[in-house]
Image: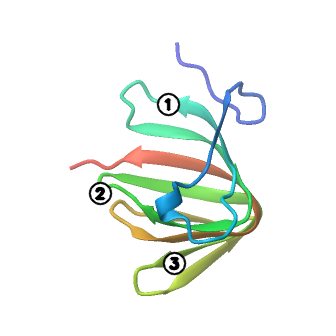
Amino acid sequence: MTAIVHFSTAQAEASLDHPRPERLLSAHNPARLTRNFYTHASGALSAGEWCCEPGRWRIAFVADKAEYFHVLEGHLSIEDESGLAVHFRKGEGGVIPGGFTGVFAVHEAVRKHYVVFQLGE
């Protein structure tokens, strides 16, 4: 039987990384901490918590993956190729669609929940 996953009690090893140097747009390379609480056996869906220090870098989503997120703390913005930036703060959420390219900026340290999913055909 599959158990319900409650993020506040789920056990998950934290994974620390940084934006790749060739994508970095800020002087400081921010630390990013990911705790993945759930991954479907197919690999088509994962969910967890992501924290990040202030910084700015280029992102490029593959065409068949998208992300829903909900900001728990902090302030971030996502800028598309045309320069349009959308800001997200505590209590706000959004979706980064498959194939999106642009700039991800953390203005104040962020903590967010995320769900990454593979898009169907």
Asked where in the image residue 70 lies, by quadrant, the reply is: bottom right
State the SS at label 1. strand
Single out the mark in the foreground, 1 or 2.
2
Q: Is residue 1 left or right of residue 42?
A: right
Write down the residue under mark 2: 63
Give, as a three-letter code, the residue at label 1: Thr
Write down the residue under mark 1: 39
Q: Nearer the viewer, residue 80 or 114?
A: 80
Please provide percent x and percent y for residue 95.
50, 63
Q: Nearer the viewer, residue 5 or 74?
A: 74
Q: Earlier in the sequence, mark 1 or mark 3?
A: 1
Please provide percent x and percent y for residue 43.
39, 32
Give the Cα distance between marks 3 and 2. Answer: 18 Å
Q: Nearer the viewer, residue 121 or 43?
A: 43
Q: Which residue is painted at 41% across and 55% down in the image? A: 66
Neighbor class of circle 3 (other Cα within 10 Å; few <14, some 14-19, many 20+) is some
State the SS at label 2. loop
Residue at the far top: name it: 1
Residue at the far left: name it: 121
